[in-house]
């Protein structure tokens, strides 16, 4: 019995059913999600429409490796529409066996093709497609055409349109670029290639999460509907109120009232209606109701008494009788002060000198003089001081006059007059601040008190009249003080304050006595509350029962969500992974790390499962926490990422293509060579390898690696470049970059350049000059390459790191060779765009001259290569054996 069967036997039936669905379906379908949701619901006591039998798990039905078709060969991609600035109508073809190397310099449109492939195939980091941001008007719809072949089936062509899911058929092809390389450095990664059993558990975890998501959505919606407090209009002390108080979002399921409890508590009939009415009448006439009324009247009396206590003191004896004394003191001290002023300073030019207004003005003048630093208030002005008013220098007469002013203002009579005036002003302020209830306010306050009895009504009338008399007395006294004459006021009526105080106290005491002797009211009140809530529940029973069901369902949803916890699946995945995947993956990663010369870095393999998903990480073998990106160099990071990627691909045992975009960025030459050979080795096993690069050294290493085998690996070089008119993404199949071509290949290109010049094109035209210049620039570069390849017999190669010492046997440079090359280079340089002096204008060569110059190069190459071969053959004999000795 397998691990999956053992696990299912220990699980509820619905879990085995879910495992069977994950085993037989590579896709996460809505049908399967709904099936799991329904069966979990039934298991937890919820009703589901229809019959929901559970399937038994059959280990023999487990489908293999997910939804990724294997053995898919990509024939081509393109035409591509609406992406970046790629020109339309281009098709990029790939070698069906061996290695396809697509070379493109920066800014020619190569990245547009890699982004398109990344969007079609499997990549850890997805890509967003972008249109031509520089185009005017509406952008065309994004679309990618591609051709492929699965196994021995017929080739097929499809077109992916923007907004569609990734093509299922290409999901087994893996794309690796810089963004996807980073994921191996930045953290842990889910294991893409697992055994069928592990894949099954992973799909089961997806089913669990999707079903749990359904329940979570229902839980959240239910919570939003039922979170606000409910039942606040019911009494918390009644039977119904206590039931309703348990219908809250936080109530445990065991404490929720049942539907039967609620319906029984909502019973209502005519007999109960009659009882409620009778109890209401009894309660209104009972001692408790009387006590409440008396307490209310007593509180109103206390309020009225408090208002009188607050204002009465200012208008009653003995305070009111002191107003005459205050006003008399003010008048007397003022007269004394004026008499003294007449004697001391009365002869001044201004007759009002010494008056209240004058004294205030003089006080301000002295304050100004003190602040200005002339004289402080306690010093007299001296001759020569500036006058505080006119600013003129003070003479002797003015000094005497000011001294007299000071003596008067500081004298006792002036101070007494000022003090008396302020006392009167304070009294006026006090009276003005006294506030009274209006007649209407007092009547409203004591209306219920007046209705108790006729005597109570008379008392209330006297209170209102007394309040009115106090207000009139205040107004009359304010008028007298303003006029400066205090006369006898109208006598007040007898004060009702104390009778009102005593009556309020009697009512309060009576109310307390009624409450103390009341045994019936509490029972009536409690019964009325019970019946009132019961009647209210009867009217809304369906709403309440609906809430009870909602809360019960929420608890069931929570139980279902908890049952769909993926922790058991993670434990199962861990067991399977450690038996079926991790050992081989760990071993293979170690081999790849060694192949890329990373053994000097202490690294360690780790794996884990979370939520049913298996992860692995190659981390630093260090006790201290550190990020790999901070410890490893850029080259080491890229080499580690390549090792992990290739190890995964190898462990997967798949045959579908892998695509790499600039995999050797930041790598040194030694690792560039290792990567090239590793990829060619993978291609030699029969796997389609597609590589995009702008690195000529890597390009050269790939070509050499394809050749440097007992059985050479086929290679298809392609170019992506800009067109003559600036078009992006021009594709050229089975074509090498110019700098990588041999002399013979360049000769064909040069011949095509000559043939492309129209015979009717005037030799004096700018177009002819442009074509001629381009031809001779390329011819000059080809002569330079001939020196490396033909004259020096490839002893040292431009993009190689070794020296071909054995090829040195074919090298010999004669004077004739030197002269021919010198003259040919000079002639090519004269026509290759070099600026000429005005006095030395060289005639533009004809097409015939171009052909002759090219023929000279071809003849030199042919003759020299034959001579090189002859020399090499002869010189190999010199080192094959010692010279033969002579014999007699």
Image: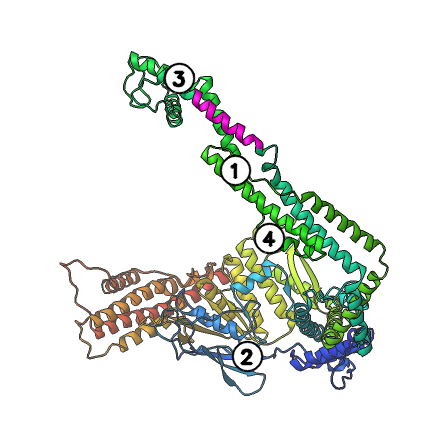
- Label 4, label 2: how many angstroms apart (C-alpha)? 86 Å
Residue matched to label 3: 406
SS class, disc 4: helix
Residue 331 in the magenta stretch? The answer is yes
Question: How far apart are labels 3 and 4 at the CA level?
Answer: 55 Å
Please provide percent x and percent y for residue 645.
59, 66
**Residue at the image point whose x is 41% and y is 17% from the top:** 340
Residue 445 sits inside the magenta stretch: no
Residue under numbered circle 2: 167
Q: Which of marks 1 and 4 is in front?
A: 1
Disc 2/disc 1 C-alpha distance (Å):
103 Å
Q: Distance between the residues labelled 1 and 3?
A: 37 Å
The answer to which quarter of the image holds residue 381 is: top left
Q: Name the residue under label 4.
A: 441
Q: What numbered label is drawn on residue 375? A: none
Q: In which quarter of the image is residue 591?
A: bottom right
Q: Give the range drawn in magenta.
A: 321-336
């Amino acid at each position: 019995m397998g691990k999956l069967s053992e696990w299912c036997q220990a699980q509820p039936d619905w879990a085995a059913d879910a495992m069977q669905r994950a085993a037989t379906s590579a896709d996460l379908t809505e049908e399967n999600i709904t099936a799991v949701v329904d069966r979990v619901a039934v298991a937890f006591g919820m009703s589901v429409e229809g019959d929901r039998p559970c399937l038994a798990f059959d280990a023999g039905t487990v489908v293999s490796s997910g939804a990724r078709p294997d053995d898919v060969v990509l024939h081509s991609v393109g035409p591509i529409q609406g992406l970046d600035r790629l020109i339309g109508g281009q098709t990029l073809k790939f070698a069906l066996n061996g290695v396809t190397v697509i070379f493109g310099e920066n800014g020619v449109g190569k990245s547009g093709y890699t982004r398109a492939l990344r969007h079609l195939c499997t990549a850890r980091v997805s890509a967003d497609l972008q249109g031509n941001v520089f185009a005017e008007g509406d952008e065309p719809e994004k679309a990618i055409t591609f051709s492929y072949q699965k196994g021995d089936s017929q080739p097929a062509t499809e077109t992916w349109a923007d907004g569609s899911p990734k093509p299922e058929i290409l999901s087994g092809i893996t794309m690796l670029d810089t963004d996807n390389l980073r994921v191996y450095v930045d953290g842990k990664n889910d294991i893409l290639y697992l055994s069928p059993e592990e894949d099954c558990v992973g799909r089961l975890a997806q089913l669990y999460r999707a079903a749990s998501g359904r329940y979570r959505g229902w839980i959240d919606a239910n919570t939003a509907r039922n979170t606000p407090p409910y039942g606040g209009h019911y009494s918390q002390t009644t039977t119904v109120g206590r039931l309703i108080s348990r219908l809250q979002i936080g109530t445990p399921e065991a404490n929720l009232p049942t539907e039967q409890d609620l319906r029984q508590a909502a019973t209502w009939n005519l007999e109960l209606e009659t009882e409620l009415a009778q109890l209401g009448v009894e309660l209104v006439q009972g001692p408790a109701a009387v006590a409440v009324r008396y307490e209310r009247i007593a509180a109103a009396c206390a309020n009225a008494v408090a208002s009188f206590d607050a204002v009465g003191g200012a208008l009653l004896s003995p305070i009111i009788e002191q107003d005459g004394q205050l006003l008399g003191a003010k008048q007397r001290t003022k007269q004394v002060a004026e008499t003294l002023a007449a004697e001391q300073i009365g002869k001044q030019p201004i007759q009002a000198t010494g008056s209240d207004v004058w004294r205030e003005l003089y006080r301000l003048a002295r304050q100004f003089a003190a602040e200005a630093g002339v004289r402080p208030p306690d010093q007299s002005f001296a001759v020569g001081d500036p006058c505080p008013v006119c600013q003129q220098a003070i003479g002797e007469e003015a000094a005497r006059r000011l001294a007299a002013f000071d003596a008067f203002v500081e004298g006792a009579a002036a101070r007494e007059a000022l003090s008396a005036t302020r006392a009167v002003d304070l009294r006026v302020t006090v009276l003005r601040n006294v506030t009274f209830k209006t007649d209407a306010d007092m009547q409203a306050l004591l209306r219920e008190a007046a209705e108790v009895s006729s005597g109570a009504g008379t008392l209330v009338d006297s209170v209102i009249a007394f309040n009115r008399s106090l207000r009139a007395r205040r107004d009359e006294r304010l008028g007298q003080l303003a006029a400066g004459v205090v006369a006898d006021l109208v006598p007040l009526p007898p004060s009702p304050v104390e009778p009102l105080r005593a009556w309020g106290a009697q009512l309060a005491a009576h109310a307390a006595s009624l409450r103390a002797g009341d045994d019936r009211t509490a029972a009536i009140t409690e019964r009325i509350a019970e019946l009132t809530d019961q009647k209210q529940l009867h009217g809304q029973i369906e709403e309440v029962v609906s809430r009870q069901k909602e809360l019960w369902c929420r608890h069931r949803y929570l139980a279902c969500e908890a049952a769909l916890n993926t922790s058991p699946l993670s434990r199962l995945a861990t067991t399977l992974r450690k038996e079926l995947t991790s050992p081989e993956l760990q071993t293979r990663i170690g081999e790849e790390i060694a192949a890329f010369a990373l053994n000097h870095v202490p690294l360690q393999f780790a794996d884990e499962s979370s939520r049913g998903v298996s992860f692995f990480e190659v981390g630093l073998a260090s006790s201290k926490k550190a990020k790999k990106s901070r410890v490893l160099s850029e080259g080491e990071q890229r080499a580690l990422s390549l090792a992990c990627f290739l190890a995964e691909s190898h462990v997967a045992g798949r045959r579908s293509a892998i695509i790499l975009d600039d995999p050797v960025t930041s790598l040194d030459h030694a690792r560039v060579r290792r990567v090239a050979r590793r990829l060619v080795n993978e291609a030699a096993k029969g796997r389609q390898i597609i590589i995009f690069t702008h690195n000529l050294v890597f390009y050269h290493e790939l070509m050499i690696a394809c050749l440097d085998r007992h059985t050479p690996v086929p290679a298809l070089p392609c170019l992506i470049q800009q067109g003559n008119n600036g078009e992006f993404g021009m594709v050229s199949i089975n074509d090498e970059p110019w700098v990588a071509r041999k002399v013979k290949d360049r000769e064909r290109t040069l011949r095509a350049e000559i043939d492309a010049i129209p015979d009717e094109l005037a030799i004096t035209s700018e177009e002819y000059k442009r074509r001629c210049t381009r031809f001779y620039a390329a011819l000059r570069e080809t002569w330079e390459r001939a020196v490396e390849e033909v004259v020096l017999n490839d002893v040292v190669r431009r993009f190689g790191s070794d020296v071909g010492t054995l090829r040195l046997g074919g090298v010999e440079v004669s004077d004739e060779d030197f002269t021919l090359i010198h003259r040919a280079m000079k002639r090519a340089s004269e026509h290759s765009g070099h600026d000429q002096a005005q006095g030395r204008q060289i005639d533009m060569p004809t097409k015939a001259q171009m052909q002759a110059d090219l023929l000279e190069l071809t003849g030199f190459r042919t003759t020299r290569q034959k001579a090189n071969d002859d020399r090499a053959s002869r010189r190999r004999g010199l080192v094959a054996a010692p010279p033969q000795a002579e014999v007699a």
